[in-house]
Amino acid sequence: MVAVARVANRAFAAFAANIEAARSVVQGGRSLEALKVGLLNVGDLYRGAWFQAVSALDAWAKEEVSRRVAVIAEGVAGPLPAKLSGLRMTVGQAVSIQLGQLSVAEVVTKAVDDDLRRATLQRPRDLADAMKYVWDGDLWREVAAWLRENIDGYARTDPGALITRLDEIVERRNQIAHGADTLADGSGGKRAIDAASTADAINFIYLIAQGVTAVLGDLPEPDPAQEVAEAKARRPPSVALIAQAGALDEGAEVRFAPGPAFESQFAAWLAENPDRAVATWVADGSVKPLRWTVDGVRYSASALVAELFNQAGIEGFDAYNGPTWWIVDGGRTLAQIAEQLYHKQ
């Protein structure tokens, strides 16, 4: 028997809160119907709840895949699913990884997040395809098996029935979103909807997410003792180490060094105004130790790298290991200075 899903993670907790809110709307509609309130179209409340539940499934699925990919890419969980293993990496990304400017996990997670951002994870086929980033298996066959074994009323459920039912629910959501749920006969009237059918759709969506979570299984959790030991051994941030040691003087010049992966792309933009590559060190222990020469604003090392990518109009990444991009007199990066200080402790 497949273990009942644990739902303690934040992604599922947010999803469950959305589902509970949709159920509350349905309950409110029932109360209004009992009061025979004629000034309000109670059906539109049910349509809103229906829409909310399907949207909650979409948001949860994206978050669930993203968090699992991050763990798998860090090497905590394995082996790699076939779809994740087949992701392509550019030469520029490979060089950035080699230089320590990006980690493999950052590149992989961003690639998957970008793919999911363009997707709508509501239809059964789209859900199953997205889950292949984190799990090799027949999703709907396994979810149907979990429902048969764990949920009353689903003893005869098969994958085809699940797929059909979820497709119907999503199709109704699309009719609500794109056509105001109006009848196809041109009369302007709306399709019938009631509390019972809406509650049933919401409950079904919740069970689907439960089943998928159970099938995927729990992510590995670090041993608490190991977590404590690692926390004690964890190195402080590079800029904090440099500031604490007083390794750089106030006003020391720090220069942007994009490295082989991006050097040619930045060349013309930096040549237009060489000050764009220059910042000065602010030695007050702040998390924003770089004052950019161009605008006089203080940035963290990573944030200023992102600002340069943005202003230069160069496709970069969402996450930067900022101290590896900045060098001081002598050619050492902030990261290298911090590493030397750390090992001297």
Image (cartoon, helix red, strand yellow):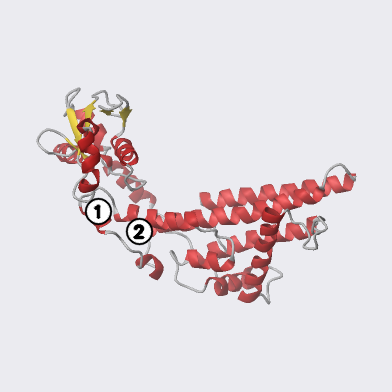
Q: Residues within 10 Å of mark 2 (few under 14, many from 20)?
A: many
User: SS for tag 2?
Assistant: helix
Q: Residue at x 47, y 57 (%)?
A: 116
The quadrant the C terminus occupies is top left
Horizontal side of residue 4 vs 189, given as left or right: left
x then y, percent, for residue 21: 68, 47
Image spot of residue 252 (x, y percent): 17, 26
**Front-most of residues 214 and 187:** 187
Residue 282's place in the image compared with 310, above or below, is above
Task: Rate crowding at label 1 as few (under 14), some (14 to 19) or many (20 or more) other CA atoms within 10 Å.
Answer: some
| Front-most of residues 124 and 185 | 185
- Residue placed under numbered mark 2 in the picture: 73
Residue 52 seen in this snapshot: yes
In the picture, the disc for residue 97 is: 1
What residue lies at 59% left-to-right and 74% top-to-bottom? 145
Q: Nearer the viewer, residue 90 or 104?
A: 90
